Amino acid sequence: MPRKPDAPEDKSPGDAGSKSARTRERILDAAAHVLSRKGYAGTRLSDVADRAEIQTPAIYYYFASRDDLVEEVMWSGIAHMREHMARVMAALSPDADPLDRVDAAVEAHLRYSLEISDYTTASIRNAGQVPEGIAVRYAAEASQYGDMWRKLLQDADNAGLLRPDLDPMAARMLVLGALNWAAEWWNPRRGSLDAVVRSAQSLVRHGLGPVPAAGDDPAGVPGSTARKARARRRPMTT
């Protein structure tokens, strides 16, 4: 999650424990930031300590090793994403169209991984880099997150809204792969996140949905509106 400022210190009996918890959270926030940008191989505890504004040896009071710290960040990233997605889905109307639910899931995934959480960006970018021992807890949580997407696509298929030529598992993995890859290339200087979300929603919806009949536009209007628009953009000839 985004780094939070330390709470003001007081003289209450539980202050020592609260301060320790805040320091641990600050270390995790710093590690998520560094890991999301430098990757597993490039993440050094000295960089984490600098960002957390502590001495490097102090990290070992909270985490036995660098890999223990990385494992906690990786697991937290996908766990937070799953919890966020569950909240987004729960807020939708029970009668929401299945493809509208997919649209909402696309937006939730992209905004959380690219804008809200360094933890999720770190877990996505490093899932294939960390040693197997670190990935066990992450993989179990990622499987539960994948189940949420499996249900979304199954509901759309049950409603007759998916193309019959699609393999559901392959479609799900391709959609998630494309969404996750955005963490590798997107930054605010390359365009707004709103534009990325809209483009992703359009690609996913029209990639999953039935192919329009010949002569129809994606909205089902006879004649190709898109083709007419392209024709209007062609340069004039003399």
Image (tube, rainbow, N blue to C red):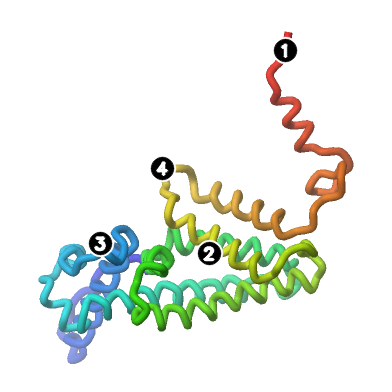
Q: What's under tag 3, amino acid-wise?
A: Gly
Taking the image as shown, residue 225 lies to the left or right of residue 206, namely right
Q: Position of residue 64 (x, y in %)?
A: 20, 84
**Residue at the disc numbered 2:** 109
Which numbered tag is attached to residue 189?
4
Q: What's under tag 4, amino acid-wise?
A: Arg
Image marks 4 and 3: residues in contact by CB distance under 8 Å: no
CA gap, disc 2 and disc 3: 26 Å
CA gap, disc 1 and disc 2: 46 Å
Q: Quadrant of the N terminus?
A: bottom left
With respect to residue 132, does 188 lie above or below? Answer: above
Q: Nearer the viewer, mark 1 or mark 4?
A: 1
Say which residue appears at 51% left-offset and 72% top-offset. 84
CA gap, disc 1 and disc 4: 37 Å
Q: Judging from the image, what secondary structure is the residue with disc 2 in?
A: helix
Taking the image as shown, residue 37 lies to the left or right of residue 23, namely right
**Residue at the disc numbered 3:** 42
Q: Residue furthest top?
A: 238
